[in-house]
Image (spheres, rainbow, N blue to C red):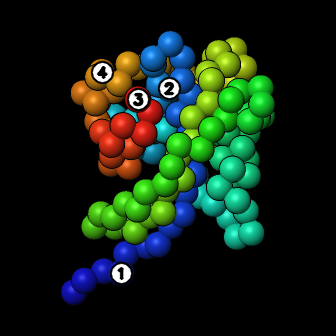
Amino acid sequence: MDSVKKDIEVALLAFISNDKVLLNRRADADSEMWEFIGGGVEDGETPQDAIQREILEEVGYPVSQKKDRLQFMGGLSFEDHRIVAKVHFFTAKFPGFEYFSDSDETFVKDLKLFNLDDALKLTLLPITRELIEKQYIR
């Protein structure tokens, strides 16, 4: 029997520093898996509002369009055996680890900067891999 796929809408952000990208090691994965920071877009929320809320919730940082050069890089549709996702992808200038704090979902010790080639050698969340491979960052 086929299971019903879950429809989701997410906003994700790559903090960029000197040709490196910030990834988060997922605390809830069965094995080491890396991803961009972000989360679901709530009803009535724009993707930019969602990413700003998610970054504040997950790492305690108030990312802004002006100060951090928050930029929308594009969207894509992603589908696997579990989900059908509408993905909104943003980049911003990395402010430094000292501006981040732990939350229930994200720990600063689990954040690391990688160059893109090294990032592709990691076990990545499939959406994260697709965004890097389709060169949304380069």
How many angstroms separate mark 1 from mark 2 (CA)?
A: 33 Å
Q: CA distance from mark 1 to mark 4?
A: 35 Å
> Residue sitting at 28 percent across and 30 percent down?
120
> Which of the image's four quarters has the C terminus?
top left
The percent coordinates of residue 60 (x first, y second) are 74, 33
What amino acid does circle 2 point to? Leu
Does residue 25 show up? Answer: no
Tag of residue 138: 3
Mark closer to the chain start, 4 or 2: 2
Residue ID for mark 1: 4
* Distance of label 4 from label 2 (alpha carbons): 12 Å
**Can you give x and y, in whole percent of width and height, for residue 76 in the image?**
43, 57
Q: Residue at x 48, y 63 (%)?
A: 86
Nearest to viewer (mark 2 / mark 3): 3
Of callouts 3 and 4, the N-terminal one = 4
Indicate the secondary structure of the residue bearing disc 2: strand
Residue 87, which numbered label?
none
Q: Nearer the viewer, residue 99 or 138?
A: 138
Q: For the residue labelled by badge 1, is the local secondary structure a helix, a strand or a loop?
A: loop
Choose top left, top right, bottom left or bottom right for residue 131: top left
Q: Nearer the viewer, mark 3 or mark 4?
A: 3
Q: Please state the horizontal and vertical placement of residue 1, each as a whole percent of the image.
A: 22, 86
Check residue 22 in the rendering and tell me which mark sits there, or answer none. Answer: 2
Asked if residue 66 is positioned above or below residue 42 in the image, the reply reads: above
Q: Residue under circle 4?
A: 118
- Residue 137 in percent (x, y) is at 44, 33
Q: For the residue labelled by badge 4, is the local secondary structure a helix, a strand or a loop?
A: helix
Classify residue 20 by image quadrant. Answer: top left
